[in-house]
Amino acid sequence: MPLPKPGSDAGAAALDRIVQRPADAVLSFDFDGTLAPIVSDPRDARAYPGVTAELARLAPLVGRLVIITGRPAAVAVEYGGLTDVAGILVLGHYGLERWEDGRVTAPDPPIGVGLVREELPELLRRSGAHDGTWIEDKGHSLAVHTRRAADPDAALEILRIPLAALAQRAGLTVEPGRRVIELRPAGMDKGSALAAVMAGAGEDAAVLYAGDDLGDLAAFDAVERLRDKGLRGLTVCSGSTEVAELAARADLVVDGPPGVAELLTGLREAITGRR
């Protein structure tokens, strides 16, 4: 399967470096909307067919294979079928949690998460939340979803201000997404998580990051900062009609999780074809 061509010189150079020197490459991915299709209920999300198998084939070929997600790390591992993918690193809760070799390490959630858990149902009631609005408790954070509502965007809009006020009172930060608003601990985002992974990379390293949502912009920023330091970097948008900002920033836009699956196959074939 041929590799797609990035629209920027920097992206093309990074992709070439990944293929030519895979042992120095870090391949990193968001989960929902990138490796797994977006679904009405996040509990039903599973990796797109063929993705897990391609990750397993790529893992021994590259320097590092990483998933950075807002989900709890163990949930992403379960839903992605990643338990047996040797060498994969899964960073959950935007990097607060680390899953590796079957073990999860994470700090205790801040007190503010408990406050939000206690007050959020009543806040939704007082705010006139639309039917179909529901709360996802992730342990270290809570997310309010409106995808099931008759008008998901309008349902989300009426909650933005009250949720922001609650987050401020609880000492949390607001993470907007595709028909979801998450209240989570501050101090860590996908860019920080990616930068930490790359901290020990050598001067010949190259990094790919693929995502689909607003939370992935921080990782795109991190890739650009790494470029400024001389590393090769490629940003990939798993395209959708719901978020345009990421596509405008990406070196390469693919057609959602099916496009990401094809990219994985193309990378693996290009790398092994050199041998």
Image: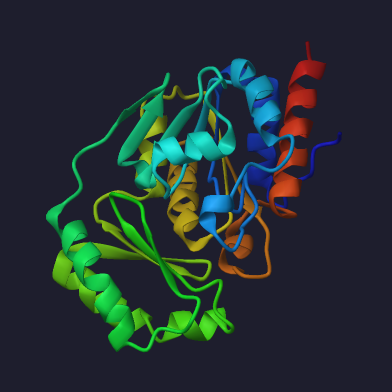
Q: Position of residue 38 (x, y in %)?
A: 61, 57
Q: Is residue 76 visible?
A: yes
Q: Is residue 231 visible?
A: no
Tell me if 103 is positioned left or right of 24 in this view: left
Quarter occupied by residue 49: top right
When the figure is inspected, residue 132 is found, relative to residue 191, above or below; the finding is below
When the figure is inspected, residue 186 is found, relative to residue 13, above or below; the finding is below
Q: Nearer the viewer, residue 23 or 115?
A: 115
Q: Residue at x 69, y 27 (%)?
A: 53
Q: Nearer the viewer, residue 142 or 15?
A: 142
Tell me if 40 is positioned left or right of 88 in this view: right
Quadrant containing the N terminus in the rendered view: top right
Q: Position of residue 270 (x, y in %)?
A: 78, 25
Quadrant containing the C terminus in the rendered view: top right
Q: Nearer the viewer, residue 18 or 182?
A: 182
Tell me if 132 is positioned left or right of 18 in this view: left
Q: Residue at x 23, y 69 (%)?
A: 167
Q: Position of residue 105 (x, y in %)?
A: 28, 30
